[in-house]
Amino acid sequence: MAQPVDNIHTATNWFGVRVNICLISGLLLLVPPIAAGNQSTETLRQTVLDFLHIQTAKRAEQDIEISVGRIDRRLKLATCQTSPTAFLAAGAKLQGKLTVGLRCAGPKPWTVYVPAHIKIFAEVIAAAQPLLRGSEISITDIIFVRQELSQLRSGYFIKAEAVIGKILTQNLSAGHAITPKRVKAAFLVRRGEKVTIEVSIGALKVKGKGEALKNAARGELVSVRNSQSKRIVQGVVTRPGTVNIQM
């Protein structure tokens, strides 16, 4: 009699196990499949940063700062199975504000654009003190300051000899960069100095002496008093100490 009891107990246990397995299987069917995660915005930002570092690697000797803008966390992108591919729009410059594209070519492809900013700095020449329009720049008038180059759209100078002797075309505050548009060529004729007057009549040239009545650079019109006739004439500065008059 003991054996049938054991058999019944065993059968009951086996049946109970089968019931439990079926129950678990049924519950698994009711659970929705785990959804693929969303692409990390920090991963996207790092991808853009790495891409721009590679693109600017040839400028290793320059002082460069790269920043990547924030990506809206509400943006839901399927996780890319491979690393997203970064790219720049045609004609994009690796300086100032720009946009970097990220493209995923997976089963659920997407493309997103991320703002970035590349700042390139250099030591450029600036005014050491307030300078007035028309003044000639000397070595004591300049200093070197660190500036972001994208802010100097009209150019800049990095060598002192490029600006020494040049004439300011506008007033300049201390610390402001000296740009090509803010200067002109050095004076070749100075007020009160003796100059040579060349009068051109066709192929014939007649020379005389005179006194410059103002400072002038190459190509500028200047008034000159003829030393002999005392007449005031106007001519164009062609070289140091020389004024040409076309007849």
Image: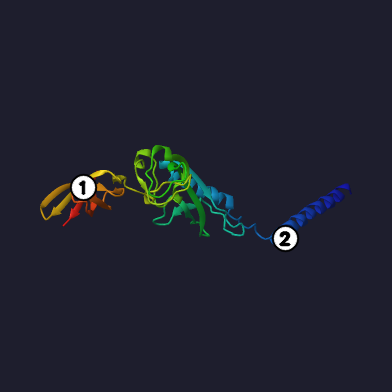
Q: Position of residue 132 (x, y in %)?
A: 42, 48
Label 1: how many Cα within 10 Å (few below 14, some 14–19, many 20+) = some
Q: Residue at x 35, y 44 (%)?
A: 166
Q: CA distance from mark 2 to mark 1?
A: 116 Å
Residue in the picture at 40% in, 50% down: 133
Foreground residue, 219 or 55?
A: 219
Q: Nearer the viewer, residue 32 or 62?
A: 62
Secondary structure of the residue carrying tag 1 is: loop
Q: Which residue is mark 2?
A: 26
Of 118 and 104, nearer the camera is 118
> Which amino acid, mark 1?
Ser
Look at the image and name its color scheme: rainbow
Q: Give the side of residue 170 with respect to residue 117, left or right.
A: left
Observer able to see residue 88: yes
Q: Nearer the viewer, mark 2 or mark 1?
A: 1
Find residue 95 and report its horizontal and vertical position in percent: 44, 50
- Residue 25 horizontal/vertical position (percent): 71, 57
Q: Position of residue 61 (x, y in %)?
A: 42, 38
Q: Secondary structure at mark 2?
A: helix
Q: Which mark is residue 33?
A: none
- At label 2, the amino acid type is Gly
Q: Earlier in the sequence, mark 2 or mark 1?
A: 2
Task: Specify the quadrant that holds the C terminus.
Answer: bottom left
Residues at marks 2 and 1 touching, judged by CB atoms closer than 8 Å: no
**Residue positioned most to the right:** 1
Residue corresponding to mark 1 = 227
